[in-house]
Image (cartoon, helix red, strand yellow):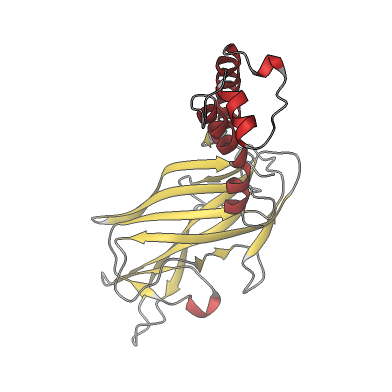
Amino acid sequence: MSVYWKWVLQSVPSLVLGVLMLLSTVTPRQARSNVEAWFIYFGIEDVPPWLATKSIDTWIYWMAFAGFCVWAIHLYMRVNVRSGKLSILIREGEPWVQMNLGVDQLQAAHTSGSRYTYRIALINSDDSTIRNVEVKLTSLEKKPENFHAIGNHLQLRHDRAGTTSVNVYPTKDPQCMDAVFVDVFSYFLGTKGYSSLSVASLPEDMNRHIPVDKYDVKIIATSERGEMAIADMAFIPRPDQVPEFRLLKMQSFPGR
């Protein structure tokens, strides 16, 4: 079941408690209490005396209100910023930004230069393995023409070609060198000033180039149990320097 449908179903108790609060404040017919009136409305004529007192409306309202608040806090306020069981990390230096001498395959002259691969790390702060984590680029703004960013899979480092999901084992190294790294951008800087940028996705789209420009990037990692990490990042070109890849915001959502 999709994690979104799971959240919808888990929101049903909040809806029920909200309706209960509403019903305790209105009545469909004349009665000693609103609660008694609703029982009679649904065909239950033999209402216990303690449900017929006017004070029961107040009790039901505040009990439903307290239950609504407790469940809403439990369900919606568990978001951890920059922490959690599954999270995304970016740092300077290898392996987050790896430099390799290379050749730009799209140039007929086979321009030589340096290729910089920008990566994110999937961090598991728990003691158990997070299984089948799928990592997707969900938005790329400003989005170049004819480039469909939504739904493109990124390339999982050290993984089999074409695989789009991976198990994330507990991250034990303080420097997170044992994390799962995911390629995001490949930036090529040629010896004659030529530069190019591409987004890492499935192998058949590996050489798809886009203009070198500033991009706001959103990446979502989701496991089979619903753990989710959502990261907002920025790719920022810098004059006479290699571009910067910066994590702006990261949120972690617990699974079931």
Q: Is residue 39 above or below residue 249?
A: above
Q: Residue at x 42, y 48 (%)?
A: 232
Residue 240 found in image quarter: bottom left
5, 82: nearer the viewer: 5
Q: Residue at x 48, y 42 (%)?
A: 250
Give the residue furthest to the right: 128
Q: Tell me: 33 left or right of 99.
A: right
Q: Quadrant of the C terminus?
A: top right
In the image, residue 151 lies at what x, y percent? 49, 67
Residue 67 shows in this picture: no
52, 172: nearer the viewer: 52
Q: Residue at x 44, y 66 (%)?
A: 150
In the image, residue 29 lies at what x, y percent? 52, 29
Q: Quadrant of the N terminus?
A: bottom right
In the image, residue 84 lies at what x, y percent? 60, 37
Residue 142 shows in this picture: yes
Q: Tell me: 229 left or right of 173.
A: left
In the image, residue 154 lies at what x, y percent? 52, 65
223, 75: nearer the viewer: 75
* Callout count: 0
Q: Residue at x 34, y 88 (%)?
A: 108
Give the residue furthest to the left: 239
Residue 171 found in image quarter: top right
Q: Tell me: 36 left or right of 139.
A: right
